[in-house]
Image (spheres, helix red, strand yellow):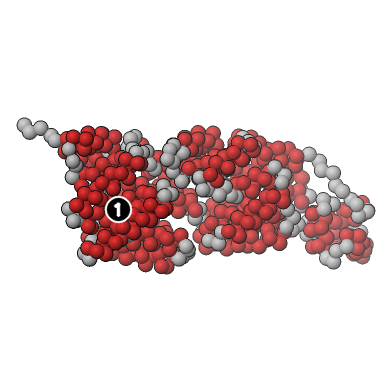
Amino acid sequence: MSQVSPIDKALQAFQNRSWKEAYAILSSVENRTSLKAEHLEKLAVAAYLIGKDKESTDTWNRAHQEFLNQNNKDQAARCAFWLGMQLLNKGDRARGSGWIARARRLIEDSQSVCPEQGFLLLPEALQLLGQGKGKEAYAKFFQAGEIGERFNNPDLIVLSRLGCGQSLIRQNRIQEGTTLLDEAMVAVESDDVSPMVIGIVYCAVIETCQKMYDFNRAQEWTEVLTHWCDAQPDMVPFRGQCLVRRAEIMQRHGNWSDAMAEVHRACEILSRPPGESVAGHAFYCKGELHRLRGEFIKAEESYAEASKWGKKPQPGFALLRLAQGKVDASKKSIHQTLEENQDHLARARILPAYVEIMLAAEDLQRAQNAAVELNKTADLLSMPYLKTVAAQVQGAVLLTEGKASGAVNELRQAWELLKKIDAPYETARTRVLMGLAHRQLGDEDTAVMEFDGAAWIFQQLGAAPDLARIEALKQPKKIDNPYHLSKREMEVLHLIARGKTNKEIAAGLFVSQRTIDRHVSNILLKLDVASRTEATSFALKHHII
């Protein structure tokens, strides 16, 4: 019986996704004799997957040189491409771009038709996508896919599907785009797709779903990614990203303690030298959890760490400043962030915080404009969670405008949707707003019930700042009356705020309508406003009622 060679053992380990074993065997063979170029490629992949980045890039370089020695320019270009992409993903843009350029020159020199031509279209397409040029990016990705189909190259085909889906979503062709993302995800379950490409596709699809508020799809594919990572305990890349996505899902469903544990592990894994840029997102998620729990110093530290890794810690940092009572700083911060982001998906993630801060800063016009924009985006994307957020935001604006009845309708719609989604924190925030709306309508009993329901959820979550706010809301509030309204005028003003007409107020108070007309005229005169609507808004803003 013939003895199995070390190379065969290494290739079998590679096939079994035993990356450490494959790396160890190939490394030991390489120490004794020269590996073939194709085996060096396997060694480079195995090194990358167990977190030995420097060894991986060095081995890609050696494989590239070996193929050049054989005058095999196409395969040399392939090695240069993957080496370039690996460096770009690590943030080494100069060296990464240089290797991509070398790969492109080799293909041009060889003048042959090969799959590598398709791979080299991908960086161009990604650059166009990053510039917001969805149509142009789609054309490049599609062309790459055609080359992949011609040569039956599974890696190129699936990366093309991924890019085409992202490009369609950028063009607001949401349904078409998500269909292609699902197609790419199904394709990576095939053994024909390389492990590096599988990890890239998993993480990119989940990130895209998160950005467009498609949380059901993001959760489904995160579970698949988790199983994939768990089946390869040797693997280092993608594991940290998986933990971040899991933490986001846990936070949304109210499992804050578990989410903190997951994101803490993610920060440790992703920040190990040389580190991965996605560490910035991990630290941002950590900051968000600290902020929501009222641990403001720790939140600020985590946001600062996120910034070091290239992640702008917004809108969380602006909301932190608001929670600290620094309203002006919060307003400047969130306004600048919104101005810097023109993509509608990016703005959708900022607008809810923008509205909250503008209302706190008494900038009603900006809050109203932002609420309208968010509602349009929610209609465009048609994602349940974003619709609930848009309804919640609209309810908050209507409440500030003194339109309590309209606010209750919007907030009730948001509450019903949130119950189905299982998002307890947002549910509680919505109940707080509903309580304020009922209080504005004069229904204090219902207001207290809403506050109590919200307080129970906040207590379970550990949301200390929100819980403190509830306690303050439940305390009787001293009403200022520097405008010398009489007791009866105050009573009439409350009824005006509830939307009652002069005729209805007269009937309810058992006086003539002429008497109420006189009271209303006196109220408008004392408050120096021109209409009943302005009187309501003024009285609410200045805490007269």
Foreground: 291 or 536?
291
Residue 179: x percent and y percent? 38, 58
**Residue 62 makes an appearance in the image:** yes
Q: Residue at x 59, y 38 (%)?
A: 301
Indicate whether 296 appears above or below 517: above
Instruction: Give the residue at mark 1.
Output: 80
Q: Nearer the viewer, residue 276 or 334?
A: 276
Residue 483 location (% of width, % of height): 91, 55
**187 with respect to 176 (left or right):** left
Q: In the image, what residue occupies the spot 23% across and 44% down?
A: 40
In this rendering, would 151 be left or right of 196?
left
Point out the residue furthest to the left here: 1
Q: Residue at x 81, y 41 (%)?
A: 476
Q: Position of residue 254 (x, y in %)?
A: 55, 39
Quarter of image, res 76: bottom left
Comparing 231 with 339, the one in front is 339
Q: Where the N terminus falls, by quadrant?
A: top left
Q: Is residue 494 above or below residue 136?
A: above
371 sits to left or right of 21? right
Give the SS element for disc 1: helix
Looking at the rendering, which quadrant does residue 27 occupy?
A: top left
Q: Residue at x 24, y 40 (%)?
A: 14
Looking at the picture, which amino acid does disc 1 mark? Ala
Residue 16 in view here: no
